[in-house]
Amino acid sequence: MAFRLALAVGRVYTQRAMAVAPPPPTANPPAQGRPDPELQTAVQYLRAGWFDRAEPIFRSAHGRYGDRPDILHYLAVCLSQRGALTDAETLWRKALAKDPNEPLLSYNLGLMARRLGRLDEAAKRFRDTIRRAPTHVEARLALASLHLDQGRFAAAERELSEFAHNVDRAIQQPGGEVLKPLQARARNMLGHALYRLGHYSPAIEVLDMALQDAGDDAARRGQIMGDRALALGGLNHHDEAIAEAEGALAIAPQSASLHHVLGFILYFAGRPSDAIGPIQKALELDPTFTPALKTLALAQTAAGRTESAIEMLHRALRHDPMDRDAILQLSFLQIERGRFAEATETLEPFLKVAPNDVRALSNHGLALRGLKRNEEARRTLKRASRLAPDDPLVLTNLGAVLVDLGRATEARALHEHALRGLPGDPRLLTNYGTCLVALGERERARETLDAALAGDPGNKDALAARAALDA
């Protein structure tokens, strides 16, 4: 399988290779009124990271001064650091209502919305921050990072290209060298966005510039090299990609994301058994790294460890029951193993939330077909075909159900349409060959099934159809 095909299911797998966590929201709005010695001490605690010491002092100040925006902000920082996110968000909302023109407050509310999974609200807050403070660097990078999280890679590329261009100009000014680390970070993100868009060579060019900007920053260099390895893999330069990922791990051996990058590249280099070890190491370092569970499931499936792969996908779904990639992978494996009822149980809750998801509908149609509920399968696949009229897999699956229903003449046109989209695909050829058998075109069916077996000698359906034809 070509590396670039990974983008369909690997969209979130490589996120951590470049993720740039925003700094803790500890910047300080201007204090109001005369200096308060206790408050000054609490702010020093805050800057030192001693949030547990700072919180009671800020609570006391809140009792004395009431809902003063700066005190609400400081107290919200303390609460957010100990995980009381909802309470922290409430305080930041109060502070912003009192001081609606303070960009820091809208920025922190954006960070909080992002942590709570409300990505659209987070984007709105970051845009509000940029509107109030056009030079707010962290808000611009946070908005670009959010675009990456949402799969809006073109929007991220536009935001980051403009940002990097502006920083380039600023670097040329006296004292501008101090901006090099910032430029390394922006270009790291831009290179990742280009990689996700499939622009592998431009991604490498940008990442090479990022390496120059990063200087001796080992952590940043490791992240950049990880993304560079992914882009090299996208170009099918697998040996170079593996060497680059190993070089990144030499710099940052405790990075879960880089172990995952190495496993991801090994899998798409056709070495699934070798990929399993690095991905398992990523999960040892970070058991919550859900994308690694899905990549591990891919590698285990390719290595013949299907039951282990199914368990990994169940683990991923325990983290997020609506994880689309995990649902599609798991339902496909359940169908392959003949567990059609389990596949319908996996798919149906997701289809209630996303009734127009073509891939989920296609898998559901296959599961219903396996349960001999052919008319339901036909309706499901017909719906998918209306949503994606040229999708080869949907067309061939619908054609297969029509053959089961004794409507091979209708099915023929669907199979031929599908093969124009994916000529030579063994799955499509098998279904077409079966259709030709049903139509009585034995010689052409034999040629078609032989072509399917040439592409996939272990294709059980093609073998069974060929044996039946010979008998």
Image (spheres, rainbow, N blue to C red):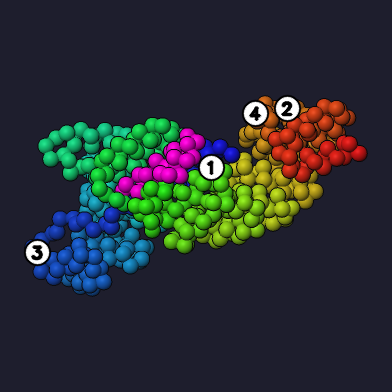
User: What secondary structure predominates along the stretch shown in magenta?
Assistant: helix
- Residue indicated by mark 4: 421
Mark in the foreground, 1 or 2? 1
- Figure check: 285 above or below 408: below
Q: Give the mark, 4 or 1, whose residue is nearer the N terminus.
A: 1
Query: In terms of sequence position, does the residue under pointer 3 or pointer 2 come before the other?
Result: 3
Q: CA distance from mark 3 to mark 1?
A: 62 Å
What span is in magenta? 220-244
Q: Which residue is mark 1?
A: 269
Circle 2 is placed at which residue position? 416
- The amino acid on which the numbered mark 4 sits, given as a three-letter code, is Gly
The disc labelled 1 sits on which kind of residue? Ala
- Residue identified by numbered label 3: 35
In the rendered image, residue 308, in percent from the top left (x then y), is placed at: 62, 59
Mark 1, Cα crowd under 10 Å, few <14 / some 14-19 / many 20+, is: many
Name the kind of residue labelled 3 in the image. Pro
**Viewer-nearest residue: 360 or 107:** 360
Which of the 4 image quadrants contains residue 341?
A: bottom right
Mark 2 or mark 4: which comes first in sequence? 2
Q: Are marks 4 and 1 in contact (CB under 8 Å)?
A: no
Direction from residue 278 to residue 128 in the image, left or right: left
Q: Residue 313 occupies which quadrant of the picture?
A: bottom right
Q: Amino acid at mark 2?
A: Glu
Q: State the SS at label 3.
A: loop
Q: Secondary structure at mark 2?
A: helix
Of the numbered discs 3 and 1, the one sitting upstream in the chain is 3
Q: Residue 467, position in %: x, y?
A: 85, 40
Q: Secondary structure at mark 1?
A: loop
Gap in angstroms between the C-alphas marked 3 and 4: 71 Å
